[in-house]
Amino acid sequence: MSEPELRVFPDSEALSQEAARQFESLSRECVGERAVFSAALSGGSTPRRLYELLAGPGFSSGIPWHRVRLFQVDERCVPPEHPDSNYRMIREALLDRAPVPSASFHRLAAELPHREATCREYAQEMARVLGSKGREAPGLDLIYLGMGPCGHTASLFPGSAALDERNLWIVPNYVPKLAACRLTMTFPVLNAARRIIFLVAGAEKAETLRQVVQGPRQTELYPAQGVQPRKGRVSWYVDEAAASLLNRRAV
Ligand code: 6PG
């Protein structure tokens, strides 16, 4: 695995603008090479601005949306119009505003009661759309990840069972600290990606970011450290506030 790239931006807006440039550029490159571009989108709050930019006049017209396939990194087990739904945030910021064909966005139906079946069906959908053969995880072209103040990414939380999943691509994961279940992509899928961009902003993440990118490897404690794609490239896009405790000489 190549050394992760770390880019520090003055603020969250600059970080989001560059992340959008990467999406536009990579989508055109991948469609030019293989007629399709696949990406997985995280939820939470940080990526909302990125998704708004992708749907906006500065980027949308440069993206071959008809050849883009979008997946969700994870989802809360709530209805799709619930305020906590990642899908709702992605729909409001991107899907309602950009010419994304409805069949090109693959919603993770985490509200359904039979969660294992939902995860199995979603993995089958990914395999069908991405042309994966057998059990090897599909190599998504791009995955946007966030990082919580506790060091989680996707819905891979410290001490949660999904950290140990080495075969299934999407699993239900009970998160004790939230007393809630999530559906989440697992390390096999994340680490098969060609490109991963972490988006991290805010001073409240500074200590965790320092631990994750410059501290000893403790994946159980800081699951974001488990994102180490075999062949892919990882970039950390962080703002000055989140980078405030980093040893810049080591950057
Ligand atoms: C989720 C996300 C999660 C998110 C981090 C950071 O469902 O919450 O997928 O992994 O990326 O919690 O969230 P913020 O960007 O809101 O800080």
Image (cartoon, grey):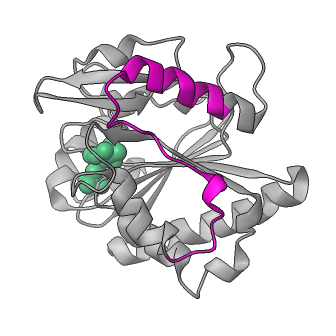
Q: Which residues are the magenta region? A: 97-126
Snapshot quadrant of residue 164? top left
List x then y, in percent, for residue 80. 34, 51
In the image, is residue 125 part of the stretch drawn in magenta? yes
Image vertical order of residue 235 relative to residue 184, above or below: below
Relative image position of residue 185 (x, y in whole percent): 46, 30
In the rendered image of this protein, does residue 118 appear above or below residue 140? above
Please tell me which residue lies in front, 23 or 208. Answer: 23
- For the image, the number of numbered tags is 0
Q: Using the image as rendered, state which of residue 73 and residue 125 is in the foreground.
A: 125
The outermost residue toward the bottom is 57
Q: Of 207 and 25, which appears nearest the observer?
A: 25
Give left or right: position of 247 versus 206. Answer: right
Q: Quadrant of residue 68?
A: bottom right
Q: Is residue 160 above or below residue 141?
A: above
Q: Position of residue 182 (x, y in %)?
A: 29, 32
Of the 4 image quadrants, the one containing the N terminus is top right
Q: Is residue 186 visible?
A: no
Residue 123: say if magenta.
yes
Q: Residue at x 72, y 38 (%)?
A: 129
The answer to whether 47 appears left or right of 166 in the picture is left
Q: Residue at 32%, 37% (x, y): give it.
A: 111
Residue 206 visible within the image: yes
Query: Going 62% across and 64% down the picture, which residue do you hit?
Result: 22
Q: Is residue 62 left or right of residue 239?
A: right
